[in-house]
Amino acid sequence: MFHLDEYVGLSIDHPASFRKYLLERFIRKAGIGRYHLLDGEKDPEETARNAGALIQAAPIDVAFVGIGENGHLAFNDPPADFETEEPYLIVQLDDACRRQQVGEGWFAGLADVPQRAISMSIRQILKASEILCIVPDARKAKAVQTCLEGAVSPMAPASILQTHPNATLFLDADSASLLKKQADGK
């Protein structure tokens, strides 16, 4: 299992640590024995390089992703780099992404949210044989609409999912509320 993204400089003990989240809610519960987590407390460039070397040697069967309020995919905020072949990037988080983290209750205020993260690149995500994208909540409805009904664009990073031959999106009624054509034809 490969980790999708992690904040630079955030302790594994912080409630917003994705390492902590994955270990507690997924890896240990599912009994996953082989996993590669991104350590945001170490040198980010070295961490990205090392994780990139490992993931390039492994076929990826399925990617589990979501769509951010600003249309981000992993921590690839707009405008996302659709061209790089690097598996992992050090990215600057935009204010919309950082505000989302505050709104979700992971941080007390915007100043507490790290400004950088290690993120799996768009091209690396697209290398997965299958992509499962889970997007709940009304606050993501506009991003869902833009990314699914708009043009594929770095300004709506998750729009790239339109190009993947085996991407499945799971939306709730709220996140799908602005779509013009519902999956059931309505």
Image: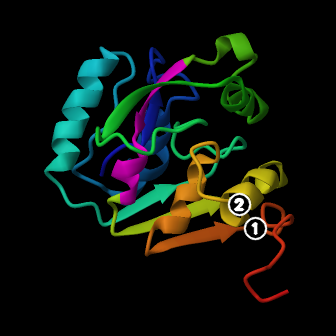
* Secondary-structure class at tag 1: loop
Q: Residues within 10 Å of mark 2 (few under 14, many from 20)?
A: few
- Is residue 11 visible from the viewing direction of this image? yes
Mark carried by residue 172: 1
Q: Which residue is mark 2?
A: 150
Q: With respect to residue 6, does 164 lie above or below? A: below
Q: Position of residue 103 (x, y in %)?
A: 78, 32
Residue 180, picture quadrant: bottom right
Q: Nearer the viewer, residue 18 or 152?
A: 152
Q: Which residues are magenta?
A: 116-126
Residue 74 in the magenta stretch? The answer is no
- Is residue 137 visible from the viewing direction of this image? no
Q: Nearer the viewer, residue 70 or 114?
A: 70
Mark carried by residue 90: none
Q: Position of residue 17 (x, y in %)?
A: 51, 29
Q: Nearer the viewer, residue 121 or 168?
A: 121
Q: Does 12 sit left or right of 80 as displayed?
A: left
* Secondary-structure class at tag 2: loop
Q: Position of residue 157 (x, y in %)?
A: 57, 47
Ranked by sequence position, the earlier of labels 1 and 2 is 2
Tag in front: 1 or 2:
2
Mark count: 2
